[in-house]
Image (cartoon, rainbow, N blue to C red):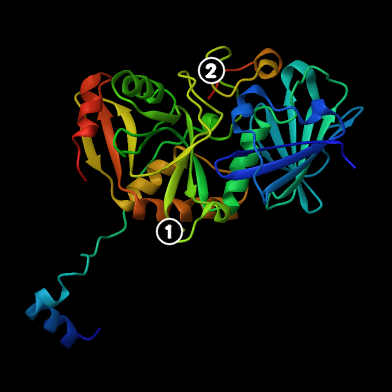
Amino acid sequence: MPLHSTNFSVGGVAVFFTGDRSLDVALAPSLLPFCGGFTPCDVTIQVSRVPKLYPSIGPKIFDSGSLWRLHSSEKRLEFDFTTPALGDAPYKRLRTDSEFRSASLLMSEEFRTSTSSLEYPVDELLIMHRLTQERGIELHGVGMAGPNGANNLFVGHSGAGKSTTARLWTSLYEVKILSDDRIIVRESPARDLHPGDDPRQIFMYGTPWHGEGCFALPDRAPLRRIFILEHGQGNVITQLNRSQAVGELFARAFVPFHRHEYIESALSFLDQLVESVPCYRYSFEPDARAVEKILQFHD
Amino acid sequence: MTPHDVKKMMREPNQHAGKKPYESPKITMVSLRPEEAVLGHCKIAGTGGPVTISCAALHCRSIGS
């Protein structure tokens, strides 16, 4: 029976994990603000240590190109985490069912340099995969609540201006930046619904995986509008039709590409999202006028 | 729908005003950034993002997002 346990929640996904040592369940600093008790939990992880891990012998399903590889093993999925600095042997292995409800995390004793069991990219991979079962998706974007209920999500690839946008808004107005790099968009989990709430209301959630501005809040806000960010001349807002919006958002989403069911789940949710939340392309110049343009904009 | 129905629609367009006009399917290219989408790399060490101490010092040898 494991002696220690911890839980946290990111994007409405509640994770409970246990281990024999307190170090096994120690949260990475970035996850500490997201620590808390949420029941029932969505994902349960048991952390244990093994003397050494050998590369998985199961068929390889996906290779990220650097930090992780995915293999199938009987009816479970095995994520092997490696680094060129340590050779081919995994320093960590996450074994999970295909719905990402129950997992075990094996830590190699061979490499004691790894400090936290759920440090990046394990935490983000786990949440991203679990969202395929939850009517939600992780997007590359900056989400902000306010001012005056104008809760906007600005989505963009690296270099599109997400952190710049976060800094601009915070320098001018009282806004709450949920994250300046990764936002989870989803329906509210059933456990958070109150009588009279609309279960299809879409919320954006802050995450621990922030950008250069280091904005990362364990909070959420109802989503009103989405803007696809791009640098341009002047500040121009163009409405996207449904198929354009789904395509542009999918290109800026974190989706497990190794199984068609997960991609279908992501596309189905994006279709629902753009039906209820207006989506625009925003070509902008990074100065105060870009902020005013959004504040004066009406759908 | 019969030819008779089509003629009726053309004569009485207002009855069908609420219906969206047909748009033929179009293929639109969107640019994917696989190196960003699969969480294959850490972000730049020391500049924020999903980089913990051990990740920056040990696991990250490449720069990504």
Q: Position of residue A145 (x, y in %)?
A: 38, 35
Judging by the rendered image, the residue that carries numbered circle 1 is: A198
Residue ID at (64%, 22%): A29
The N terminus of chain A sits in image quarter: top right
Q: At 32% across and 24% down in the image, what residue appears?
A: A169
Q: Position of residue A116 (x, y in %)?
A: 74, 25
> Residue B34: horizontal and vertical position, in percent?
53, 33
Kind of residue sitting beneath label 2: Gly
Residue drawn at point x = 76 percent, y = 44 percent:
A103
Q: Is residue B34 left or right of residue A290?
A: right
| Occupied quadrant, residue A87 | top right
Q: Nearer the viewer, mark 1 or mark 2?
A: 1
The answer to whether one can see residue A52 in this image is yes
- Mark 1 residue type: Asp
The residue lying toward the viewer, choosing from A268 and A258, is: A268
Task: Residue A68: give x, y in percent of width and height.
Answer: 69, 31
The foreground one among B5 and A217 is: A217
Q: Are dots 1 and 2 on a single chain?
A: no
A273 left or right of A65? left
